[in-house]
Image (spheres, helix red, strand yellow):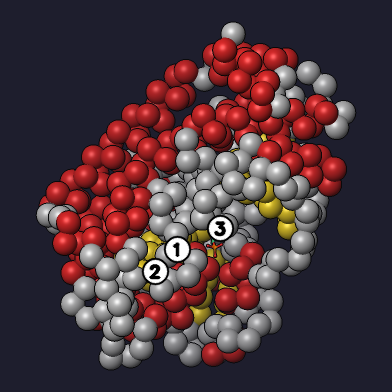
Amino acid sequence: MELEAMYQTLGVSPQVLRFGEEILDSLRERFAQIDAVAEYNQHKVLAAMQKNRVNATHFAATTGYGYDDEGRDNLERVYADCFHTEAALVRPQITCGTHALAVALSANLLPGDELLSPVGRPYDTLEEVIGIRPSKCSLAEYGVTYREVALTKDGGFDYEGIRAAIGPRTKLVTIQRSKGYATRPSFSVAQIGELIAFCKSCKSDVICMVDNCYGEFVELQEPSDVGADMIVGSLIKNPGGGLAPIGGYICGTSACVERCAYRLSAPGLGQEVGANLGLMPSFYQGLFLAPTVVAGALKGAVFAANIYEKLGFKVIPTGSETRHDIIQAVELGSREAMLAFCKGIQLAAPVDSYVTPEPWAMPGYDDEVIMAAGAFVQGSSIELSADGPIREPYAVYFQGGLTWYHAKLGILMSLQKLCDAGIVKL
Ligand SMILES: *Cc1c(COP(=O)(O)O)cnc(C)c1O
């Protein structure tokens, strides 16, 4: 068979391929559901682009101050309409997701205010932004205090604990949609809506921000549809569709987003400045492609979950669970297995397929981290990638894939390398 020969050329044995195909046969219905969500979200993006009369003039490059940058301003209207918010800040000057979150937090928290995370410890890099780990220029240094309420044992919200933690100084509640590098469940938009409603019932004027990284276009709704005052994310994840080479976004109420713009540039300047540097075509087109790209990544995640679950590994989410983000965690149980898995992902890449990933001490993270990625955009995790901190329970976090076929190859290659290393027997 031609396809089997092609897989063999790439390094996947007929046995591994057969194992994968059997799993795939059981996933047709899941894939149809993923396609249905993508179809809806595609049209949501299209409607926002049509409403804002996107045309070729919006793709023009600007330089310098970037005054009257119509392409940039219109892109922000498109994002706001797509995510049903009053305003949006979508900029190449936002360097990554952590930066977008740091801008959103520091713009809306003043000395004496308190920040609350009702979903336990936030993403690793936010520990330094907040000052959980002492850090220069953290919110803590500026007199913003922080509290967190851990999730319950079954991964739910500790409502009584949250009520007790919300006090007169609680200004902002930060809710992380995706599990990140934790092995807790990711939250559905509906769950986030309930949590926001509860927080607002405790304190009506509290600002609710959602770290939306990896969650965009996975469901029909976004957290901004269920009461979030701000949703924040990275353009080298889902909404950039693999084309955006840099950038972040903050969508939300005019009051919150306006402050973010002043924080990002300077008081008095705000959203008026910030040249687009010729990136508008990739920002618009990336958003246009994002729902389909996310669907491919989701299929890869579901496929990986079912493969590794069948082999007896703990996978989060499980093979049959509904998805709320594009991340798939697989607890591999050893450093060697993490290295083999990542080697396979790397070997499947279109770029840098010949290199071997090694663990390293990455800025912003506490433990050594291993990363496999052969991406067109450096560090892009909407492209096929696998990473994880080298610590118990030795979980790799697998995500992305600009096309489903590439994600499929990556997963089969990871399995191949685990077989070759004698860690897995089919
Ligand atoms: C990726 C991510 C971030 C921040 O990401 P950057 O690497 O700075 O772009 C924050 N929160 C979550 C949940 C993430 O997945």
Callout 1 secondary element: loop
Callout 3 secondary element: loop
Dot 1 amino acid type: Ile
The answer to whether the residue labelled 1 contacts the one labelled 3, judged by CB atoms less than 8 Å apart, is: no
Q: Which quadrant does ligand 1 occupy?
A: bottom right
Residue at coordinates 47% horizontally, 53% vertically from top-left?
237
Q: Closer to the observer: label 3 or label 2?
A: 3
Indicate whether 218 appears above or below 68: above
Q: Earlier in the sequence, mark 1 or mark 3?
A: 1
Q: Nearer the viewer, residue 224 or 394?
A: 394
Image coords of residue 26 (percent x, y)? 55, 15
Dot 2 amino acid type: Pro
Residue at coordinates 83% horizontally, 28% vertically from top-left?
420
The answer to whether the residue labelled 3 contacts the one labelled 2, judged by CB atoms less than 8 Å apart, is: no
Q: Which circle marks residue 378 in the picture?
A: 3
Q: Is residue 251 visible?
A: no
Q: Earlier in the sequence, mark 2 or mark 1?
A: 2
State the separation of the CA atoms marked 3 and 2.
15 Å
Q: Which circle marks residue 246 in the picture?
A: 1
The answer to whether the residue labelled 2 contacts the one labelled 1, judged by CB atoms less than 8 Å apart, is: yes
Q: Name the quadrant containing residue 389.
A: bottom right
Mark 3: few, some, or many residues within 10 Å (few <14, many ≥20)? few
Q: Look at mark 2 in the image and give the residue it sits on.
A: 92
State the separation of the CA atoms marked 2 and 1.
6 Å
Q: Name the quadrant containing residue 269.
A: bottom left
How many marks on residues? 3
Q: Earlier in the sequence, mark 3 or mark 2?
A: 2
Residue at coordinates 26% horizontally, 79% vertically from top-left?
66
Dot 3 amino acid type: Gln
Mark 2: few, some, or many residues within 10 Å (few <14, many ≥20)? many
Question: Where's the N terminus, which quadrant?
Answer: top right
